[in-house]
Image (tube, rainbow, N blue to C red):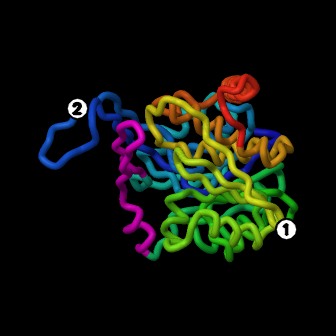
């Protein structure tokens, strides 16, 4: 594949998803499965699927791919502009997770605590030649020294990158073009602090854009020396929240690639995520560029007519 635009480094796996017919699981109560799938997942896998749907050429690297996941990835991306050549394929079963979903509620399950505590590396070292040849990147912070190396290589070669859920004092945050921090993350890492306090702390540690997402609540965003800006997410009917954050990250990568302003970036990423949560399964129905633009235009019409208030 030639002229790769986006390099993504992080978690790539196979996801077994189960959408329930009715309410979420209860102890000793039967639940009917409405739909189930085995599709590419992980923060990087999902972001790659979304970016490709938006028209971006992608190369992914990270997790080693085992025998049960390899056919899935190869078949799924066979006709898509996603380059798998940097991945390492192994003889074990491969990394998978299992997610039970009903509307806004989901529970992921897997073996990640055991994998991360095994003392063994089950992901690739980033390759400098992959990063040199791209225009933008996304680096997830979960693979220790290897993730830091990927970010360092981006800095070395002047490749702007998006990261997620990175603390204010981390290398990832200080050097990222965009850091997207979820409510789940900052509620855990800054347990006694308000979202506004966390934003101020993070904004003063980087020249990049910091975005705090809060599920259905308003998003906060800004840069060093600025006031905190706010934006409401798009009002959509939620079918599944699986992949919402990964899609938001993909939207930020697209915006970075295309030189969007901060406000345009947050709005575009939010629209991508809004479309993602309105359908299931996301990998088979990723947001298209025309759909994202249409949702944004619809919101702007509502604001201009006074039906919505712009923050």
Q: Quadrant of the N terminus?
A: top right
Q: Is residue 13 left or right of residue 270?
A: left
Q: Position of residue 34 (x, y in %)?
A: 30, 28
Cα–Cα gap, marks 2 and 1? 52 Å
Where is residue 115, by image quadrant?
bottom left
Residue 212 location (% of width, % of height) = 63, 57
Is 269 a magenta residue? no
Bounds of the magenta segment: 96-118
- Whether the residues at callouts 2 and 1 have beta carbons within 8 Å, the answer is no
Image coordinates for residue 29, horizontal then vertical, percent: 14, 42
The image quadrant of residue 105 is top left
Closest to the observer, 104 or 96 = 104
- Residue under pointer 1: 156
Q: Is residue 289 visible?
A: no
Q: Secondary structure at mark 1?
A: helix
| Few, some or many residues within 10 Å of mark 2 (<14, 14–19, 20+) | few
Mark 2 or mark 1, whichever is nearer to me:
2
> Which mark is drawn over residue 32?
2
Q: Which of the two discs, 2 and 1, labels the residue nearer the N terminus?
A: 2
């Amino acid at each position: 594949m030639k002229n790769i635009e986006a390099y993504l480094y992080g978690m790539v796996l196979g996801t077994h998803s189960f959408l329930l017919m009715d309410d979420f699981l209860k102890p000793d109560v039967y639940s009917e499965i409405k739909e189930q799938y085995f599709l590419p997942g992980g923060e990087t896998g999902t972001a790659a699927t979304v970016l490709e749907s938006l028209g971006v050429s992608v190369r992914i690297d990270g997790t080693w791919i085992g025998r049960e996941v390899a056919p899935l990835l190869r078949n799924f991306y066979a006709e898509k502009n996603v380059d798998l050549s940097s991945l390492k394929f192994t003889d074990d079963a491969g990394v998978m997770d299992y997610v039970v979903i009903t509307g806004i509620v989901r529970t992921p399950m897997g073996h990640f605590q055991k994998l991360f505590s095994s003392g063994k590396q089950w992901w690739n070292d980033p390759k400098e030649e992959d990063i040199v040849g791209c225009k933008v990147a996304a680096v997830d912070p979960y693979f220790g020294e290897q993730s830091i190396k990927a970010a360092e290589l981006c800095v070395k070669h002047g490749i702007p990158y998006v990261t997620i859920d990175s603390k204010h004092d981390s290398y990832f945050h200080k050097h990222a073009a965009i850091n997207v921090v979820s409510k789940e993350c900052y509620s855990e890492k800054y347990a006694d602090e308000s979202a506004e306090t966390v934003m101020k702390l993070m904004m003063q540690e980087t020249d990049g854009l910091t975005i705090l997402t809060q599920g259905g609540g308003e998003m906060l965003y800004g840069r060093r020396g600025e006031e905190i800006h706010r934006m409401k997410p798009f009002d959509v009917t939620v079918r599944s929240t699986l992949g919402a954050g990964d899609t938001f990250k993909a939207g930020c990568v697209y915006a970075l690639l295309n030189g969007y302003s901060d406000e345009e970036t947050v709005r575009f990423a939010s629209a991508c995520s809004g479309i993602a949560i309105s359908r299931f399964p996301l990998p088979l129905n990723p947001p298209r560029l025309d759909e994202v633009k249409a949702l944004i235009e619809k919101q702007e019409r509502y604001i201009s007519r006074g039906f919505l208030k712009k923050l």
